[in-house]
Image: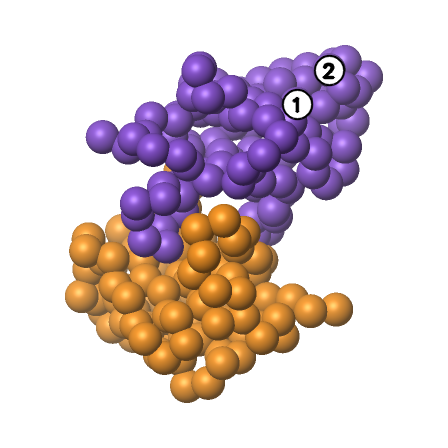
Amino acid sequence: AQSVAQPEDQVNVAEGNPLTVKCTYSVSGNPYLFWYVQYPNRGLQFLLKYITGDNLVKGSYGFEAEFNKSQTSFHLKKPSALVSDSALYFCAVRFQTGANNLFFGTGTRLTVIP
Amino acid sequence: DAMVIQNPRYQVTQFGKPVTLSCSQTLNHNVMYWYQQKSSQAPKLLFHYYDKDFNNEADTPDNFQSRRPNTSFCFLDIRSPGLGDAAMYLCATSRRPGQGREQYFGPGTRLTVT
């Protein structure tokens, strides 16, 4: 079955430290991968996406993500966390063989501790 | 600024009383989506319009309907809300249903059913 998973419900990191939010997927064929961020009582905000090409994708607010085909992962990273990065992060995948549906992971709540 | 707007941001309705949520966009995108997001869960696609073509997800209850009178507006109608329909409802748009295209989300409408 095709799916996307975020294995960690919660990630805590100290301000200034690097952060990683994990995402793995299971799919036959090549996926399109996305990261979105959601602040409290707000809609989802697009951060970055991987379609093809360079495995390292740079996005908004200093975030980046690395597509790893052998590990079927698309982890979100940032070299130095800010308190304002605290939010709910969703990984999403759209499968090439599928329709328009974006399949979201269950989300990871990131807390950056001052 | 081009954006996706949802009104109202908070809606309270009574059990069984029809309610309509509104979404408008200034992005001139072809596709408009409605998602349901329950607390601490991933957004779940209910349906989408590609121009005037309506696409319902297989597991969307009949209680949920949608209308798109023109490119800019899309409505979500809940004919007889139940307590289980309390959720955040997110509207999103994309330029075309290409697999690599990101979606742009509105701020959401939080629905409470009493």
In this rendering, position of residue A4 left or right of residue A58: left
Q: Vertical placement of A56 versus B21: above or below?
A: above
Q: How dense is the environment of label 2, judged by Cα within 10 Å: few (below 14), some, or many (20 and up)?
A: few
Q: Decide: few, some or many residues near mark 1? Use Cα within 10 Å; few <14, some 14-19, many ≥20.
A: some
Residue that badge 1 annotates: A77
Q: Which tint is chain A?
A: purple
Q: Chain of mark 2?
A: A
Q: Residue at x 27, y 51 (%)?
A: B84
- Across and down, in percent, residue A97 comes to 30, 45
Residue at x-position 36% and y-position 65%: B48
Report the chain shown in orange.
Answer: B
The quadrant the C terminus of chain A occupies is top right
Q: Nearer the viewer, residue A109 or B14?
A: A109
Given contact means CB atoms under 8 Å apart, are the residues at marks 2 and 1 in contact?
Answer: yes
Q: Is residue B109 visible?
A: no
Q: Which mark is residue A18?
A: 2
Q: Position of residue B44 (x, y in %)?
A: 35, 48
- Type of amino acid at the residue the image marks with label 1: Lys
